[in-house]
Amino acid sequence: MTGRIPEPTENPSRREPVGEARWPMAMAVVTAMVLTLLLPDDLRLAPRWVLPAVEGLLLLALVAGDPGRIDRRSTVLRGTSIALVCVLALSAVWSTVQLVDDILHGGKETGSATSLLQTGGTVWAGTVLAFSLLYFELDSGGAAARAHHMPRTPALAFPQQLNPDVADADWRPRFVDYLYLALTNATAFSPTDVMPLAPWAKIAMGVQSLGSLLILGLVVARAVNVLA
């Protein structure tokens, strides 16, 4: 296996693939909204209902503009998608920073091991979902663009792209692939099977790895200290 993306093979009978279903991405957004509501007030970027309301409106706009399957290429929809993932990612990073600050300075969530583990788990899960959606939207122009054409030089190189022999000719990364990427990056703190090629992808994966390392390391250490 090499780092070079092989040349796509021409196939006159190759059919244009159908766009990815909208519901996995929508369910991830809704779950992230619920996790935001479960956070303590001092760990949220804005008052309790503000971010979920903004995220919900942006999601509704996407569903209304391109329902069912994601295959409509539109500047407005593209901008809406990017705005949504930016809000989610900013909220996740903010919650991570605030949680680390509370642990270091003895915030109210750190007095109980149960409360600390619950809060830490909620923040960690929120970052996984937020970054999975970030990768999903920014890689190769987004899901709608990927449904029509896969570039030779994607921002994130999956094993199926590095070794086409293990995938169908019309293979496209789906949301579950990006969710798996975010999950493994948050637990291994480094790339596993998906290689970041673009600078933004390396920065995003680095930020997620660092945030996850801080959350898991500090939360577990503090919880053990409280129990002791």
Image: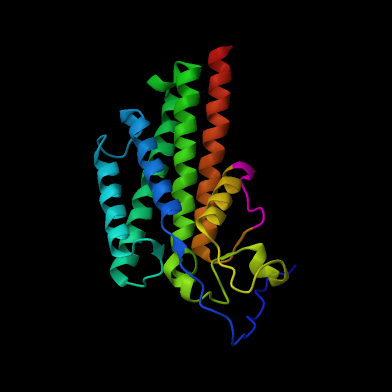
Could you say which quadrant of the image residue 22 lies in? bottom left
Residue at horizontal 45%, vertical 52%? 24
Lateral position of residue 101 relative to residue 4, left or right: left
Tell whether position 41 is magenta. no
Prevailing SS of the magenta stretch = loop
The quarter in which the N terminus is drawn is bottom right
The quarter in which the C terminus is drawn is top right
Labels in figure, total: 0
Image coordinates of residue 28 in percent, x first then y, are: 43, 47
Residue at horizontal 41%, vertical 69%? 71
Image coordinates of residue 168 in percent, x first then y, are: 65, 70
Lateral position of residue 197 relative to residue 26, left or right: right
Could you say which quadrant of the image residue 92 lies in? top left
**What coloring was used for the rendering?**
rainbow
Residues shaded magenta = 187-193
Residue at horizontal 57%, vertical 52%? 181
* Near-viewer residue (146 or 102): 146
Residue at horizontal 44%, vertical 40%? 126
Seen as rendered, the residue at the extreme top is 228
Q: Is residue 142 visible?
A: no
Vertical arrangement, residue 110 with respect to residue 80, above or below: above
Seen as rendered, the residue at the extreme right is 1
Vertical arrangement, residue 158 with respect to residue 99, above or below: below
Vertical arrangement, residue 226 with respect to residue 171, above or below: above
Vertical arrangement, residue 52 with respect to residue 141, above or below: above
Image coordinates of residue 195 in percent, x first then y, are: 62, 61
Image coordinates of residue 43 in percent, x first then y, are: 36, 33
Q: Is residue 226 visible?
A: yes
* Near-viewer residue (19 or 31): 19
